[in-house]
């Protein structure tokens, strides 16, 4: 905003200091009419209007006498959109709250996997995981999230005995097909 002041025969033009704003000049400030950009907020760091995922692209400001001005419609991303920790969810299953950012919106859903000592795949946390097999009455183990029986093993230090004798595994003993 400018002010023109006449003081003792001297004309002075005083320009108001510009302040940093979190939005671009509106369409109206550019001499146009409100339109599809008017619904959004300007983001200086992204150099565009913040829009939803369905509207990413461009929006236009219609300006009187000079056609249109096109601006980017961008996403600012999500804050605090993190995955939760894995937790036990029934025998042989684990789940966690999984998060993903879609433009400016954080969405969450549950992910499932097999627990330690089980293998397979599951999409619902109720079926698809099988306990690792036994050897000499001792169940094998596996890392959580294992998908194949070959991930099952008897850990080093496990003792065993059968009709031929007894012993201790000196290394991890993996299942083989």
Image (spheres, rainbow, N blue to C red):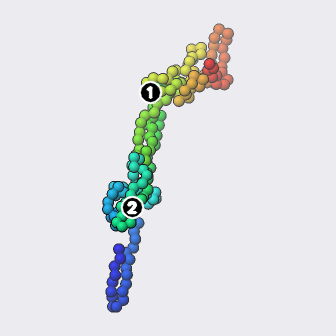
Report helix, strand or loop for mark 2: strand
For the C terminus, which image quadrant?
Answer: top right
Q: Position of residue 143 (x, y in %)?
A: 56, 29
* Residue drawn 39% across the image and 73% down it: 17
* Residue drawn 56% across the image and 18% down it: 133
Q: Position of residue 72 (x, y in %)?
A: 43, 56
First in sequence, mark 1 or 2: give its number: 2
117 vs 32, left or right, is right
Q: Residue 108, labelled with which disc?
A: none
Q: Which residue is mark 2?
A: 68
Can residue 25 be seen here?
no
36 up-or-down from 118: above or below? below
Can residue 85 be seen here?
yes
Pointer 1 with pointer 2, Cβ within 8 A: no
Q: Which residue is mark 1?
A: 125
32 vs 135, left or right, is left
Q: Position of residue 49 (x, y in %)?
A: 40, 56
* Residue drawn 36% across the image and 57% down it: 37
Q: Residues within 10 Å of mark 2 (few under 14, many from 20)?
A: some
């Amino acid at each position: 905003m400018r002010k023109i002041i006449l003081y003792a025969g001297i004309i002075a033009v005083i320009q108001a200091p510009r302040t940093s704003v979190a939005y671009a000049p509106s369409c109206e400030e550019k001499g146009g009419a409100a339109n599809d950009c008017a619904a959004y907020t300007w983001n200086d760091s992204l150099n565009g209007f913040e829009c939803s995922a369905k509207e990413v692209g461009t929006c236009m400001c219609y300006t009187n006498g000079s056609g249109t001005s096109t601006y980017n419609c961008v996403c600012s991303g999500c804050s605090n959109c993190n995955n939760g920790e894995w937790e036990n969810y029934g025998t042989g299953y684990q789940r966690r709250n999984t998060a993903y950012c879609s433009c400016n919106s954080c969405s969450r859903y549950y992910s499932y996997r097999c627990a330690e000592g089980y293998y397979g795949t599951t999409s619902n946390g109720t079926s698809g995981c099988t306990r690792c097999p036994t050897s000499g009455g001792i169940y094998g183990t596996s890392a959580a999230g294992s998908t194949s029986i070959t991930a099952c093993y008897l850990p080093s230090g496990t003792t065993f005995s059968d009709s031929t004798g007894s012993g201790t595994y000196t290394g991890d003993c993996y299942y083989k097909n």
